[in-house]
Image (spheres, rainbow, N blue to C red):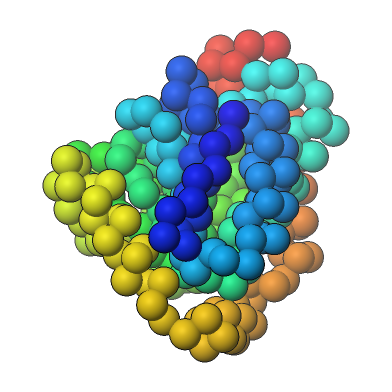
């Protein structure tokens, strides 16, 4: 489910579940954890790219198999919070390459990176409230990304938007043509490898300390809030037609 490649000190972690639009199943999230062990131990890495195979970056959560199991649901959401934190705390600059849909938890992975490249026709956003779900897991990262007021409006409004609108809202840092996206990401990642290794790591660690990215308690509470809401009748009635159970 995960492919790791390295070229010119750029490590790319690719979610490889294209048939499911790289939706975040428990198995995929667990695989990302295992892959991040390898990424974190790579002393030659100078920049990191998070990508998705196929037409989508990540189409959100895949709740099949956990929709009727509150404990598994809670574990899944906690693991996603931990994956997000591990990506955030990598000592090198991180880039999300968003060629297609980045929805819900997928958009959370997009914004947890230091940079995000996308194109005008991609689809991004947070439709959680439309599904009767609380967007607690993504909220801390979105507030850090675009500010509390804008994040509040976006999460309460729900829905999705185009990549161009997402760029204007601050979800993406770069907008380019779809056919130029992979090369633009690689060129930028290569530029970032030229920064001082210690300077980059120290800068990231300090920025993460300032904005509260080290706060594990917030992530655990967010996962528990989301799990509790998903277990309720309102969310179950909307999610079960989508994921079975």
Image position, residue 211 (x, y; %): 57, 79
Residue 47 vs 36, above or below: the answer is below
Image position, residue 35 (x, y; %): 66, 45
Q: Is 144 positioned to the left or the right of 56 in the image? A: right
Is residue 234 visible from the viewing direction of this image? no
Tell me the residue at 73%/24% (across/down): 66
Residue 14 vs 85, above or below: the answer is above
What is the quadrant of the C terminus in the image? Answer: top right
Q: Is 65 positioned to the left or the right of 190 in the image? A: right
196 or 207: nearer the eye? 196
Is residue 208 visible from the viewing direction of this image? yes
What is the quadrant of the N terminus in the image? Answer: top right
Q: Is 108 positioned to the left or the right of 194 in the image? A: right
Tell me the residue at 72%/71% (across/down): 215
Tell me the residue at 17%/47% (across/down): 180
Asked where in the image residue 41 lies, by quadrant, the reply is bottom right
């Amino acid at each position: 489910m995960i492919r790791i490649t390295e070229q010119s000190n750029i490590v790319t972690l690719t979610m490889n579940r294209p048939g499911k639009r790289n939706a975040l199943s428990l198995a995929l999230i667990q695989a990302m954890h295992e892959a991040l062990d390898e990424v974190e131990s790579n002393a030659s890495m100078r920049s990191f790219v998070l990508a998705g195979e196929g037409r989508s970056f990540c189409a959100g959560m895949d709740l099949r198999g956990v929709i009727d199991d509150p404990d598994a649901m809670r574990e899944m959401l906690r693991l996603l919070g931990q994956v997000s934190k591990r990506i955030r705390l990598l000592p090198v600059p991180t880039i999300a390459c968003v060629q297609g849909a980045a929805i819900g938890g997928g958009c959370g992975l997009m914004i947890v990176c230091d940079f995000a490249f996308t194109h005008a026709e991609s689809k991004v956003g947070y439709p959680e409230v439309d599904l009767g779900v609380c967007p607690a897991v993504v909220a801390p990262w979105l507030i850090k990304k675009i500010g509390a007021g804008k994040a509040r409006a976006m999460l309460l409004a729900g829905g999705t938007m185009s990549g161009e609108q997402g760029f204007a809202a601050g979800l993406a840092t770069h907008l380019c043509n779809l056919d130029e996206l992979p090369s633009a990401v690689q060129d930028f990642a290569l530029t970032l490898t030229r920064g001082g290794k210690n300077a980059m790591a120290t800068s990231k660690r300090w920025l993460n300390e300032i904005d509260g990215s080290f706060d594990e308690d917030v992530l655990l509470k967010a996962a528990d809030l989301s799990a509790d809401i998903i277990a309720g009748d309102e969310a179950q009635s909307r999610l079960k037609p989508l994921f079975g159970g």
